[in-house]
Image (cartoon, coloured by chain):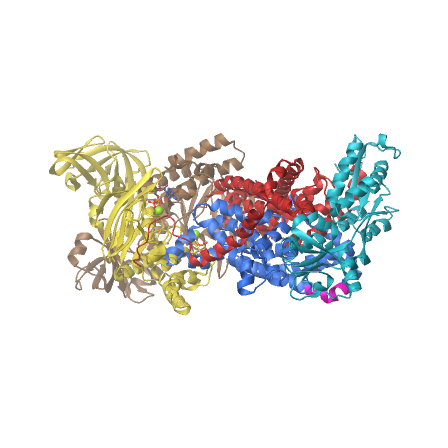
Chain colours: A blue, B red, C yellow, D brown, E cyan
Amino acid sequence: MGTVRRRGREPGVPVPLLVPAVLAVAFLVLPLAGLVIRAPWGELGPQLTSPAVGQALRLSLVSATAATGLSLVLGVPLAWVLARSRARGRSVLRALVTVPLVLPPVVGGVALFLVLGRQGIVGRWLDQALDVTVPFTTTAVVIAETFVAMPFLVISVEGALRAADARFEDAAATLGADRWTTFRRVTLPLVAPGIAAGAVLCWARALGEFGATITFAGNFPGTTQTMPLAVYLALQQDPDAAIVLSLVLLVVSVATLLLLRDRWLTRAVR
Amino acid sequence: MGTVRRRGREPGVPVPLLVPAVLAVAFLVLPLAGLVIRAPWGELGPQLTSPAVGQALRLSLVSATAATGLSLVLGVPLAWVLARSRARGRSVLRALVTVPLVLPPVVGGVALFLVLGRQGIVGRWLDQALDVTVPFTTTAVVIAETFVAMPFLVISVEGALRAADARFEDAAATLGADRWTTFRRVTLPLVAPGIAAGAVLCWARALGEFGATITFAGNFPGTTQTMPLAVYLALQQDPDAAIVLSLVLLVVSVATLLLLRDRWLTRAVR
Amino acid sequence: MSLAADVRVDRGPLTVELDLEVADGEVLAVLGPNGAGKSTLLRVLAGLLPPDDGRVAVGRDTWDDVPAGVHVPAHERRLGMVFQDHLLFPHLSVTDNVAFGLRTRGVRRPAARAAAAEWLARVGIAELGDRRPGRLSGGQAQRAALARALVGEPALLLLDEPLSALDARTRLTVRAELRRHLADFPGSTVLVTHDPVDAMALADRVVVVEEGHVVQAGTPADVSRHPRTDYVARLVGLALLPGTGEGTTVRLDGGGRVAVAEETAGPVFVAVRPESVALWTTRPEGSPRNVWPARLVSATPHGSTVRCELDGEVALVADVTATAFAELGLAPGAPVWASVKASDVAVYAR
Amino acid sequence: MSLAADVRVDRGPLTVELDLEVADGEVLAVLGPNGAGKSTLLRVLAGLLPPDDGRVAVGRDTWDDVPAGVHVPAHERRLGMVFQDHLLFPHLSVTDNVAFGLRTRGVRRPAARAAAAEWLARVGIAELGDRRPGRLSGGQAQRAALARALVGEPALLLLDEPLSALDARTRLTVRAELRRHLADFPGSTVLVTHDPVDAMALADRVVVVEEGHVVQAGTPADVSRHPRTDYVARLVGLALLPGTGEGTTVRLDGGGRVAVAEETAGPVFVAVRPESVALWTTRPEGSPRNVWPARLVSATPHGSTVRCELDGEVALVADVTATAFAELGLAPGAPVWASVKASDVAVYAR
Amino acid sequence: GGSADDGTATAPGPSTAELGGTLTVFAAASLTDVFTDLGERFEADHPGLDVQFNFAGSSALAAQLTQGAPADVFASANEAQMTVVTDAGMADEPQVFAANVLQIAVPAGNPAGVTGLADLAREDLTIAVCAPQVPCGAAAEDVLTAAGVTAAPDTLEEDVRAALTKVELGEVDAALVYTTDVTAAGDAVEGVDVPEAERAVNDYPIAVLADAPNPGAADAFVELVRSGEGRQALADAGFRTP
Ligand SMILES: Nc1ncnc2c1ncn2[C@@H]1O[C@H](COP(=O)(O)OP(=O)(O)OP(=O)(O)O)[C@@H](O)[C@H]1O
Ligand SMILES: Nc1ncnc2c1ncn2[C@@H]1O[C@H](COP(=O)(O)OP(=O)(O)OP(=O)(O)O)[C@@H](O)[C@H]1O
Ligand SMILES: [Mg+2]
Ligand SMILES: [Mg+2]
């Protein structure tokens, strides 16, 4: 009582939150700093101008973005069903959705073969009837990344939906909005921050995807060789080059996120 | 108007949501079904009773849980700072936090060496002053998993915090709660669903962690060999065994999630 | 369109069981104490809460019929609803909130926004259309919610305390506007309110709900003249005393007797208007046949009169002029004598 | 403890600039139209919204002093606050909501819960302590919010429309309980309300805020007898007519003249009580010196009288008995004549 | 534990009876089965000795060693990664204890009828070859160049197991992999011998590390690997032995 405080709109972060937050930042940022210090920056020029790197980077960005788009289209509705519908078997469904999170990605790739490969359940039919082969194509990269990354989106969007106030949906219903309109015009904007967070996770996970991609899509420069594959191969011969490549990937993705998030957040703010 | 509908508390899922949701489930579950069908169940018995598998499974669960705990302790405060504080440089901080999401895990392992290895920035000092070596220990597994998985928690909790109604925090302040008490007793319970979702993502990611772990912690049975590493080794020799091992990991993790989530959700419900 | 509802909903320990009819163009006010089930009723009528039993029909359409398994979802019911806590969409501007219902019903954006702007002007917040609801004051938010409910062409209007947050002046204008709108409105209206003035001003008929059941129904004048429960009596400013008629006296259930003008027998209500109660500091002698000792509980100035709540053998409310009150020199807790002429006491069968 | 606040806050187009003092134990009612800045004022006093300029002091403590750079955060201010939209914590039971403030101030759980239970009983919802707020009715939630604000021992009570959602009966009891509490309460209280009865019943002093500024201040009786703005006049049920005194006539700013009993000069207010306005279907001849033609805008029954709003040269409100109204046979829109005795017109300097 | 301060008893010499403590072996993942087997025998021969294996990709192991990982023995799947370690001065005198040659792996039944390297140029087949950055890829390049074949691969595998997995699943018609992998894959995969493979034999070197905590046991283990017993085990797994 009566303490005279310096004025400011920012009342400061409480110490029990500040200390772990600073530790967390240190924990996440120090290794990065290590990489930056250690990186042989002399290699940066040649790496950046190498057409193979540009190709891999472009493919990574394109396929991660496509995978995120696909995940949004399929995953947000699934999250809604998990959060809002009262259907039985929901908790089993939710558990099944989390499966690709724990499946070692290489096994995930094998699983995708079992469905979409030449001998796969669906793939056999695609191959024979439509003459479409999925593995070893850019499509396969997108599918592998979606398979691995979509659960991140689903789980975090479901969490956001659960925390949102469902009474606004009641209000929308009394205004004649059916559930689909309500979903589009009320629920989605209300949970926009959660969806943005989920999309960031999904995109980042897709961008870093390695195991399922190399298994299901293979590694062919220009078609299926994404940055993580390029980095892995570089690691085999020249670890320093691998670090530089990783940093390139990092800078590009961080820049993208910075741009996107600020756009999203200003729109999603209450 | 005037349509006569079958009665039921469940007004049904709108088709534009149902179709993608079903597709999403198919997409995530079919590959799993493929694995289950294809798995050589005859191998299950010997695998399950093998002490090495038990050891790896136990280590996986313990280290993923420890990593999740560490992530909660460090990551939730960080998420709060990102969502609530008005400090400048917040967007840069947020972007830095997302970095481990895109860093290829193997490179992440190298980065951890640069900090905590015997020659690392911090590790050198730990080694000389305290005679503590971090790499190749179970601690290293937990650290590698935390490094890779914590950003998932941070990003999704931040999204939940952003979507939560901050006016309840005002009400708490008028009741004499400082920011820390408010955080503990109001904010945390309000965003519990978001934190639960983030923790699930974090745990699952930690459980599936491979690249950073094998690099930074090595692959020593009993100490650092988690299930994904065991699966990797099994893949070298006997892919079928690898599939069985993956399924074991799946079943255990799904069962754990089912148990935990239902507990959390019933508590977090409004 | 006319509304007929006969529904039962279980709300924890309370069972809400109501049977209502509202004719075309009629406004039904639902009065009742907190937690009586008024908002619950509106949620059922809106289709947001499926009843546990019963039927809801509007015009020739059945909206709910539990035995037959019919439940029309809320969004197909063509409603306008004001929620007790507004529930304006936080992510839309005020204009877009109001235009929302029209947009979902297929009206093009410019037309919907124009209609919304018109309604915002009617409720007096024309200039706030571009704001987000988070930046409105409480009363402004309520007006926006009212505009949102009225802008469409609903078959049924459900208004849950639509004027409670409005300031006195705005309340007059918005009430007048609402009255004008309701007069032209062809559908049924159910209005929940705690303000008897709103009920009197806007409603054709009143039902009083207590603990989930209708305890009284009738025209506003009827209900206010012959309250049947203590709640209604308080609401309209009467003291209500149940008792048993014994010729020209009534033996009160709470103890004591009241002299009345008419002969009565059996269970009756005695209603005393506050204006007809006179206060004295010493026991008065004279023509009034009802004189009781009492204690002043509270005195509330109200315009040129002071409303005095009395406690004692008979609980009464007295309205005396400010001058008279000042002359009496009373403080809360003081003992007083209250008198009422027998001819000023209303008595009617229970 | 006494409160002294002189603050300025910019709220979009509106600047709220208020200078208030509330003595120890005093209750200040803040009245004003929607969007006037009342809730904004309370947020500033609570420390939730740092003022753009000015000072807030309670007792000898400075809570805000913008030039000196002082800002005590909300949680160090020892407040009790009722928010306009309750803001009960959805994850805590009602009892835990009420006990929250005590718990943060270090009271042990059983003691805090006991105190909470006691306050819940006082506001009449003792049996709802175990519920989550999401399962309360609107009025029940408001009572819980009131209990939560009152349970501690705050230095300053900030009540934003604390009784608006209560039913008429509960309102009486809760108002009486609040009155009793405020009478014993040593600190200052700022009460925002739209109900003049609440202001009269609970406040020692009233300030009227319009568009962010104080337009009138004084005792409740003073303000209600001599309103200085149309808003206040409407609030207390008077018609307020600004004009210029010219001997025993006042030339009204809106056109027309009013005969008054006293001689006046210069800018004055003329206030007409609705009870003193008589209505006629034909032009009356007689002693009343003020007779105006008018048009009936609306007629609202209220107890045994009907309140008639009139439009015309002079905008007036007339209260006539229900019988008289029925005999006049008037419908909204009908032309009438209104008369007022000069001796019934209050006139005072602007 | 695998931490550095684990070497409790350091044996003075290679005398078999006195070996004790922990022996840490970093070995290429392709050696998992053989070395696990040999390790068990070694432990049986030397009660009191605990053998710890760290199996991973050779490059990961080399990186760990240069970061100061505590190890006694390093067995690499190629000379290049061993060179990384010897160049860092952490080991000397690596000895080749096994070798591997390429074979064409085809799914059981050889549905595409692959008979030799020339078939790898067929556009209608789905072909997997290792990426040139990894040892089997380098070897494949040599072999293909020697044979004058321009392969038409659909994927450049980052490790030989990944290529083999695709053969096992029938998703590629042929892959150039090591004989040992074909052996390990069992019935699901058939091998087609490639005469040109002799041009690119891949050697597996093994070395005792310079600051091995348990040099005595390390020497003994290397001896075991290079002994007749070790050679037999390696040969059973499809390796060539010197
Ligand atoms: N979601 C809910 N679940 C269970 N019970 C509820 C729920 N909401 C309200 N109730 C209870 O049902 C009863 C009726 O509530 P309702 O909201 O209909 O009251 P009301 O008449 O609108 O009161 P008020 O005038 O205070 O708004 C109350 O006792 C309330 O506590
Ligand atoms: N968060 C905000 N940001 C900017 N302006 C606001 C905000 N909240 C309210 N306002 C505006 O500030 C003005 C004062 O609002 P305030 O809530 O103080 O009014 P009030 O007097 O409490 O009205 P009411 O009686 O309707 O509750 C209004 O014009 C309102 O639109
Ligand atoms: Mg209600
Ligand atoms: Mg307000």
Confirm whether residue B6 shows in the render: yes
> Does A117 sit above or below residue B196?
below
**In the image shown, does E69 or C61 lie closer to the viewer?**
E69
**Residue at image point 71% right, 49% down:** E183
Q: State the image coordinates of residue E19 (x, y, percent, origin top left).
A: 83, 32
Confirm whether residue E213 shows in the render: no
Q: State the image coordinates of residue D270 (x, y, percent, origin top left).
A: 32, 59
**In the image shown, does D21 or D144 lie closer to the viewer?**
D144
> Does D270 sit above or below residue B252?
below
* Total numbered labels: 0
| Highlighted range, magenta | A45-55
Q: Is residue D306 magenta?
A: no
Place residue C233 in its image quadrant: top left
**In the image shown, does C95 or A247 lie closer to the viewer?**
A247
Q: State the image coordinates of residue E240 (x, y, percent, origin top left).
A: 80, 49
Q: Is residue A48 magenta?
A: yes
Q: State the image coordinates of residue B49 (x, y, percent, origin top left).
A: 62, 35
Place residue A243 in its image quadrant: bottom right
Quadrant where the N terminus of chain B sits is: bottom left
> Does C260 sit above or below residue E156?
above
In the visual, does E216 lie left or right of D297?
Answer: right
**Residue at image point 48% right, 54% down:** B22
What kind of secondary structure does the magenta stretch mostly adopt?
helix
